[in-house]
Image (spheres, helix red, strand yellow):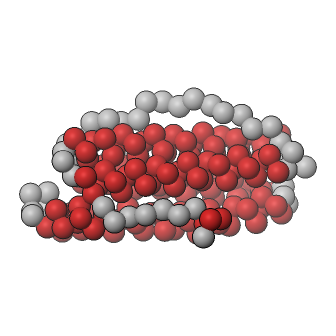
Amino acid sequence: MLSEKLLNELNLQIKHELASANYYLAMAAHCASEDLGGFAHFFMIQGDEERFHAMKFYNFINDLGGKVKIYGFEDPRNDFQSLEEVFTAALKHEQFVTGRIHTLLDLANQEKHYPTISFLQWFVDEQVEEEASMNQILSKIKRLGEDNPGIYMLDDELAKRTFTPPAAE
Ligand code: FEO
């Protein structure tokens, strides 16, 4: 049985994951407008991952007999001056999501709600990867500089990103 407090927080996480998908779609659109198709593709795939994260919470709440609630969210940022700004914003956002997951885990631990503790472990690990991925690309952009032709090699590299939902592997 989920407490009302834990249920509310799990439902809020659906909102944050879906909002993340929106943020990354806006970042994809920005990169596409700069003719950086590989970067745009990277963020489209990131959006797919975020919707997958949202659905994991959706299914978990349903499985525990709770009622899912869907909330709206603010407009994403659509304007960026550089790739460095895009990836700095993406990294900052992932750090926010990591904080959310840790807060949720703290609450589940306080309530000794073992199914939620177990469920959240996947997200704890996933957030380490999400932050590392944004951080690595940000470091490469800083090292190269925005006007370096190497940016196009990075664009080609990012065009290869794929996403297979774990359950389907
Ligand atoms: Fe679902 Fe990127 O956190």
> From this viewpoint, which residue is outermost toward the front?
168
Residue 165 vertical placement versus 52 (above, below):
below
Residue 88: x %, y % from top left: 32, 53
User: Where on the picture, by quarter, is residue 114?
Assistant: bottom right
Residue 5: x %, y % from top left: 79, 42
User: Where on the picture, by quarter, is residue 91?
Assistant: bottom left
Residue 39 vertical placement versus 149 (above, below):
above
> From this viewpoint, which residue is outermost toward the right?
1
Q: 128 or 165: which is nearer to us?
A: 165
Q: How many marks?
A: 0
Residue 140: x %, y % from top left: 24, 68
Q: Residue at x 41, y 46 (%)?
A: 24
Residue 13 vertical placement versus 167 (above, below):
above
The answer to whether 18 appears left or right of 162 in the picture is right
Q: 168 or 71: which is nearer to us?
A: 168
Q: 4 or 38: which is nearer to us?
A: 38
Residue 109: x %, y % from top left: 78, 61
Q: Residue at x 69, y 61 (%)?
A: 120
Q: 127 or 112: which is nearer to us?
A: 127
Quarter in which the C terminus is drawn: bottom right
Residue 104 visible, this orientation: yes
Q: Residue at x 84, y 58 (%)?
A: 113
Residue 92 visible, this orientation: no
